[in-house]
Every structure is written in structure tokens, then in C-alpha cells.
Amino acid sequence: MITRQTHGLASASASAAALLLCAASAAAQQPAASPATSPSAAAQADAPSNPNNAPAQRQPTGTNPPRQLQRDAPSAAKPAGYNPSFSPDGQHFVQQDGAKLYQAICQGCHMPQGQGAKGAGFYPALANNARLASSAYPTYVVLAGLRGMPPFAGRLSDQQVAEVVNYVRRNFGNDYQDAVTAEAVNGLRPAQER
């Protein structure tokens, strides 16, 4: 086949159509693949012999049961200086002071000065936050979580929740003086967490 090179879209599409016709006619002229030369037959020929003619069994991928990581085991070796923020039972924070609780739990997302952050997620600013005027709102959010924030009802005592909420409500430009009490926290705590 001879094609003439010209400039323009019409001649390019005509050339492409001509190439497709040539490829189709060449394929039609080739003999059909025999079972001995088909890809599946070639794969079977390369496969190891199976005396019982049983189908080969393959291990499924991605179905292994999850295993506990050794680093998470209670007896696993810990690096030098390992000092987790949790109590020995691994479930509760040990800090009792509102500022220390904020540093251990909150400032990783809400930032050291409560300014919040945006990026991989949205972490609202606690500084100068009018939503903190009602003490029930931040108490409930600490207990139950909100959007991307996890709940801390199972990891903080009523007194710890009161301390961290009072700290946030009295710092970072906030000046809400009505103190949250442990009793008020207990009243907002989910029934299964009491």
C-alpha cells in the first residue's frame, strides 16, 4: 500500500483508516491458532506435570487473616526512653492538669496556641472561639467526638474532661469563667461509658 503524505486532518484520518484495513486483512489471511499454539495451551505446556490431572491450586492473595503486630504485644521490647501518655492498662491518659492534657491530646491537631489547622484535614481553631461560650458544647465534643475528632469518653475521667475543657475555655483568648464540674461531665457522658 502506498500512502501520500499530506498535511491536514482529513489525510491523517484517511491514512489511519488505511492502516487499520491493512492490519485487518493481514489478520484474516493468517491461519487460526491451533490448540497447540494458543496462549492457554502454551501456558499448560509450561506448567509442571500433574499426575492426577487435578487443577493446580493457587493461594488467594490478600486473604491472609490479620495478625497482631509484635510491637503491639504487651511483652514486646520498647525503645529506650519509651514513656507512653497512657496509664499502665493502656487505656486512660495519666495527665490530670488541663494544660498537660491539652498538650498530650489536643495540640497535635488544634496547634499549641489553639489556632487550628487546615491541610490533610480541618482542625477548627479553639482560640477566640464563640462556640466555647456554652460549657456543654466542648464537654460533649471531648466525650463523643465530632467529625474527624475521636471520642475521649473511654480514655478520660470526668475530672480530666472538666480540666481540659476549663483550660481551653480560659486560654487562647477565651475568657469563659463558669467552670465545668466533674458532675456536669458525668451527666453528658454516654450511658454505656458511666
Image (cartoon, rainbow, N blue to C red):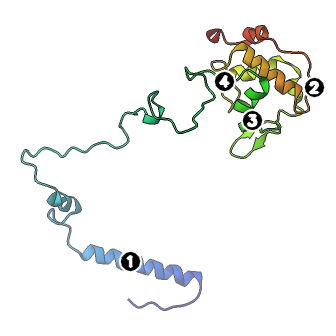
Residue for badge 4: 151
User: Who's the residue at 58% across and 88% down the image?
Assistant: 7
In the displayed structure image, the side of residue 174 where residue 59 appears, left or right: left
* Spatial CA span between label 2 and label 1: 81 Å
Amino acid bearing label 4 = Pro
- Between 135 and 7, the residue placed more toward the observer is 135
Asked if the residue at tag 4 contacts the one at tag 1, i.e. Cβ–Cβ closer than 8 Å, the answer is no
| Figure check: 61 above or below 193 | below
Asked if the residue at tag 3 contacts the one at tag 2, i.e. Cβ–Cβ closer than 8 Å, the answer is no
Q: Secondary structure at mark 1?
A: helix
User: Who's the residue at 56% across and 21% down the image?
Assistant: 88
Neighbour tally class for label 1: few under 14, some 14-19, many 20 plus, Cα within 10 Å: few
Residue 138 in sight in this render: no
Residue 91, picture quadrant: top right
* Spatial CA span between label 2 and label 3: 19 Å
Tell me the quadrant of the picture where the N terminus can be found.
bottom left
Front of the two marks 1 and 4: 4
Amino acid bearing label 2 = Asp
* Spatial CA span between label 3 and label 1: 68 Å
Amino acid bearing label 1 = Leu
User: Percent from the top left, x then y, of residue 48?
Assistant: 14, 55
User: Who's the residue at 92% across and 19% down the image?
Assistant: 177
